[in-house]
Structure formats: structure tokens, C-alpha cells
Image (cartoon, rainbow, N blue to C red):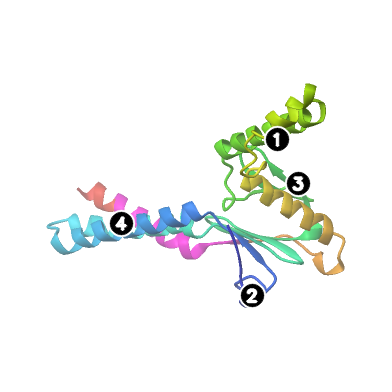
Amino acid sequence: MTTPDHRSPESRPTAKDVIYRSPLALVAGVLLLVLACWLGFDALVRGHGRTPWLALAALILAVPLVVAFTLRPAVFSGEDRLRVRNPFRSVTLPWGEVASLRSGYTNEVVANSGDKYQLWAIPVSLRARKKAARRQARADAAARGGRSGAFGFGGAFGGLVDHDGPTRAESDRIIDDLRATAERRGPASTAQGEVTVRWAYELIAPAVAGAVLLVVLLAVG
């Protein structure tokens, strides 16, 4: 789920950044874009009357939304900053401004000011969390059985316990890594500064334009 990136620091992460993204969201985004383009262009070419215009408006609205919610979200963890790229805005937090990272039903970072920012690119899987908890429980039971099993049976039975798989859900392990980086880099002089927020107008503007065009076409009838 993580890949290193070696691009310029202005619009992209620095060479030391680690990128966290959701592979499932990327796959879903590509499939949705292919489906939308296939249906949309088919309606544009073969449609009659208002159909091509409706298809065009729907494409202008749908494509930015699909990109925003599937392909765009990412979290960039660098030596001096945490950059959170959510569907419609990007938030850059120097590690010194990170108060905490929380993992509940969603993952979020809390700034020193108290502002909270959700980490869209690191979704919480309750199913994965439950599976990891069951593995941890089996491992704990096996450890207790190995130490105190009567007549040595505990150790034998403990050997039958399945230890395969992580005992922490992947999203929780990522949050643990981010917390460790925040604690390690937070006091650094190069990790100080202000929290900055940038809105993704390149996605917001076409989506709004497509929505307005679609409403007008439907209202005109």
C-alpha cells in the first residue's frame, strides 16, 4: 500500500516521502472512468435530440467526482511534513503541528489548533480489524497455553494455533507508523510551520459546471 516517490517537492512529494493510497479505490476509479467514458461517448455519438447534451453534462459532472473520490486521495509522509490529499482539498501539516493521529471508524489527523482532517486515502476496514483482533487473541491464548499447559499439553495445543497473518489491521499499522514519525520528527526545527490548505478548484469547477449544465438541460425539458 506504500510506494516511494522521487519527484519535485512543489506539487509532488519530496524524495523521502512515503505515499499511502488505497489500491481498491484506484481499481474502482479506473473501472468507473472506463464505464463512464464508454457509456458517455456512445451516447454522444449515437444519441439523438438532447441525449448528446445530457451525456456531455453527465460526463463533465461525473469524471471529476470519480477522480476526486478514487484516484486523488493520498497521504504523503515526509521527514518534515505530512501532506493529506483528500477529494477536494490538500492539507499540509508540518510534523510540529500534528497534535495526534486518531483511528476509530475513520482515520484522522488533529492539528495543534484542534482542526481535524480525515485521511481519505487510509480507509478503516472493520472486517480487517476484527480478523486481526482474532489472530491476536489466538496468539495470546497460545502463549498462555505454552507457559502453563498441564502435562505439557498446553504447548502442544498451542502449536496448532494459526499464527498466519498480521495481528494489526493494515490501516491501524499505517497510523502507528505515522504516529511514530510524528513523535520522532515533531521537535525538529525543520518540521515547524503553519498548516496550509489548498482547495482542488481544478476538480470543483468542472463538477459544478457539469451540475449546472445538467440542471439547465433537465429544467428546459
Badge 1 or badge 2: first in the primary sequence: 2
Residue 92 inside the magenta-drawn segment: no
Q: Nearer the viewer, residue 63 or 127?
A: 127
209 relative position to 85: left or right: left
Residue 110 x, y percent position in the rendering: 73, 48
- Mark 2 Cα shell of 10 Å, populated few (<14), some (14-19), many (≥20): few
User: Which residue occupies the extreme top position in the image?
Assistant: 150
Mark closer to the chain start, 4 or 1: 4
Quote the CA–CA distance across marks 4 and 1: 47 Å
Q: Position of residue 176 (x, y in %)?
A: 73, 49
Dot 1 crowding, Cα within 10 Å, few <14, some 14–19, many 20+: some
Q: Which residue is mark 2?
A: 10
**Rendered image quadrant of residue 44:** bottom left
- Judged by depth in the image, the label closer to the viewer, 2 or 3, is 2
Please give the range of residues in magenta. Answer: 198-215
Q: Residue at x 67, y 45 (%)?
A: 172
Marks 1, 3: nearer the viewer = 1
- Give residue 16's position: percent from left, percent from top: 70, 71
Circle 3 residue: 114
- Numbered disc 3: secondary structure: loop
Question: Distance from label 2 to label 3 (Cα)?
Answer: 26 Å
Residue closest to the far front: 151
N-term mark: 3 or 4: 4
Residue at 66% in and 47% down: 108
Q: Which residue is mark 1?
A: 139
Amino acid type at mark 3:
Gly
